[in-house]
Image (cartoon, helix red, strand yellow):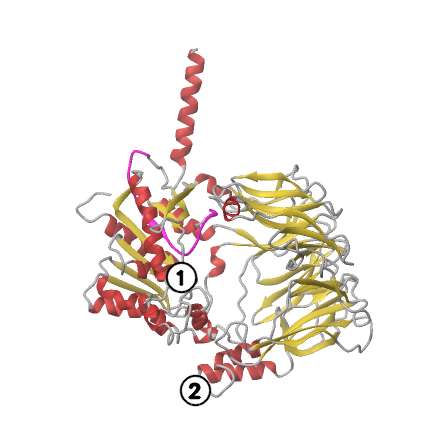
Amino acid sequence: MKKLVLTTIVLFLLINLSFAQKTAFTVEDAIRVKSLGSQTLSNDGTLLAGIISDGKARFGTDHFRFRDPSYLNLRAGRLVIINTNSGAKNEVFKEDVRVTSLTWDEDGKNLFFLQQQEDKLVLAYYEVKSKRTKYVKVKDSRILTSNSGINVMPNGSDIVLAVRKVGWFEKAMAEYKEATEGPIVVYDGNDDFLKWDRIGLTGSLTEIVKINVKSGNVEDLLPESSYGGISISREGKFLSYPENFRTKTSYKRNDGTEYKLSFLKLTEKDAAPEVIYGKSDKRRRFWWDEDERNFAWVDSGNVYVDKLSTFGTIEPLNITKGKAFEDEKKEKPVKFSVVRWNPSGNKLLLSSKKGWWTINSNGKNLKMIYELPQTDEEKKVAPNRNVVKWSNNGKYLYVSYSEKDRWQRGIQRFNIDSGKFESLVVNENLYSSWRFARDSDKVVYSKSDGDRPNNVFTNTLDFKSETQLTDLNPWVADKKWTYSELISYRDADGEELKGILYYPVDYDPNKKYPLVLEVYETFFNNGYRSSMNLLANQGYFGLRPSVDLEQGYPGEAWLKGATSAINLLVENGQVDNDKVGIQGTSYGGYASSLIITQTDRFAAAINISGKVNIISFLGDSPKIGTRNYAAAEVGQDRIGGSFWDEPLKYFQTSAVFFADRVKTPHLLISGEGDWNVPGTNSREMYYALRRLGKDVTWVNYMKGGHGAGWASTESDYYDQWERIFNYYDKYFFPKEEKK
């Protein structure tokens, strides 16, 4: 008995010692968190390539040179190849490099990529067998670009990619300098394009060529145009490509652009392109099978299929016409959309309001395999399911899975014959980036516990053989870490909403804590957030509350929803009602400024890179054209009309016009180089609040972009967080109080 007691005491002491040894998560830690990005899996699933990078990769961008044709700035990272069978990791270079467009050849013997060397891209490939990197000596002076990625021909010896036409650089630089240097810049309203739209149009133009890897010889395939991406059929016979033709700067959605889809027979010398979809201002989506030979599209709810091999000789087949109806009288045909092709290219998965359907590509055997929830109540509780793979044997659909009222997430398998779902992996973990090998039963995905950074795992399709491939941040085990909880609350209109609550480190349920809201739109899934972990290590609760944004009246949502979430936490005895702050970035920053014109509930508010005046914002951000008009009229800002149609709504949703109502201390943080939400918009709120004698501070990082210090230099990032910590500390804990 004494031995048992002694063992228990020792175990207790060891556990407490373990917790005591953990150190605070700092800004330095936030920067050094690593992730594996740009992942690409070989066809047999044996090799996974990707780029490991940390927060430092974000720093040092010259935001003032956005759209400068001479400026190239790929993010740096460590290019690695991981063997999914053994877990062995090989670093292609022994230092960080700037690479993009990672692409395996057919057999997984070579990994191709574009590497930045000074101000240009070079074509390179890594030989897996020899473990050597080789550079293709391209016998052409044209500039390589990543616009259309890298497409490896089946023979592995030829690469198809995009290049700039001879003379493109001189033309592009002349347009850019005229807009940025002048000395006189003229903006003519009679021009079909805004000046920066024309610059963007020039930036989209490329030619398509084929490059022989060994000889470096270049063969022209397609003339200069704006290509939306290119695809090569599996056997290498066909190259299909969409084109976009900008006709004018338009302020209406789906206007000002014409679309076209064509293909080229690569096996026929000097073959002329054949047009699949003629130039039209109506955008049409096409679904291709895995071999890029057969394609489908939808017109008026009917599904059509065609083949490149017989294109032009046989009429496209309407495979659904007259085969399914919504009513017994057969007067209302079911309207279908395409989900995907099966791996064999002879069957399609369709969807409708009723459910999921399968049908042969020849139009036979249309069958509804799963009935979707139909009533509002059924839809409200039904889990989210998204088809991510059709098994090679055709028997199963693999679907990502997420419940709507709790964190139960993962992947299921749907048996097409039985119509039943089987949960393969469903739990509280957070899964993402499903990658399925084309020619094997391998699957690769990212997983976390919902609080810490992701790692990458591999498995087989029965999901019984999980193996961890990366341990990118082993040091987090020695750090104090927040943990998250999904909470439910009702807004002022009675609408049930969800929020993600992040607990302070060393949480004591007998204490009340300060709370900082990080606002945007809707939140459900948790996941590693550096901001929430930093605030939790300050001894604060963090909360990401969802709000119900209403078209025409978006400015009311945060007041109705965010404050209700606060009330819940205060009533639960978790939060000190006098120590609540709010912050957000971009649209969330806009919300932070707006809500303090409506309530004095907050002890402090921080706006990072968010607008404060939607009216003046219409003329901001010239480098991205009409985005700000579209955001207000039909986009994120949700006003629902032009300023001249709805002037009062623009006025009501602009914080600066109600600056006289602000009682909350306000910190505005911006980046001088922010081409998305210029710092000059934040400046308006600073001048207004200062004029009114309010408590306001404006911090403008002269090298910063969108995100301010996070999109600036490393020292600015440290400075931004120090200011945020100090700001909350100042107003949560006045001098007469002890923290």
Residue shown at 57% from the left, 84% from the top: 171
Mark 2 and mark 1 lie on one chain; the one further toward the N terminus is 2
| Residue 603, numbered label | none
* Label 2, label 1: how far apart the Cα atoms are: 31 Å
Q: Amino acid at mark 1?
A: Tyr
Q: Which mark is residue 587?
A: 1
Mark 1 lies on a secondary structure that is helix
Residue 722 place in picture, x, y as percent? 33, 54
Tell me the element at label 2: loop
* One can see residue 120 in this view: yes
Q: Is residue 195 above or below residue 296?
A: below
Q: Which mark is residue 185?
A: 2
Task: Please state the extent of the stretch shown in magenta in the rendering.
Answer: 509-528
Along the viewing direction, whichever of 56 and 656 lies nearer the viewer = 656
Drawn side of residue 694 relative to residue 706, left or right: left
* Residue 514 included in the magenta stretch of the image: yes
Going 40% across and 34% down the picture, which residue do you hit? 19
Can residue 134 be seen in this snapshot? no
Quadrant for the N terminus in the image: top left
Q: Position of residue 5 (x, y in %)?
A: 41, 15
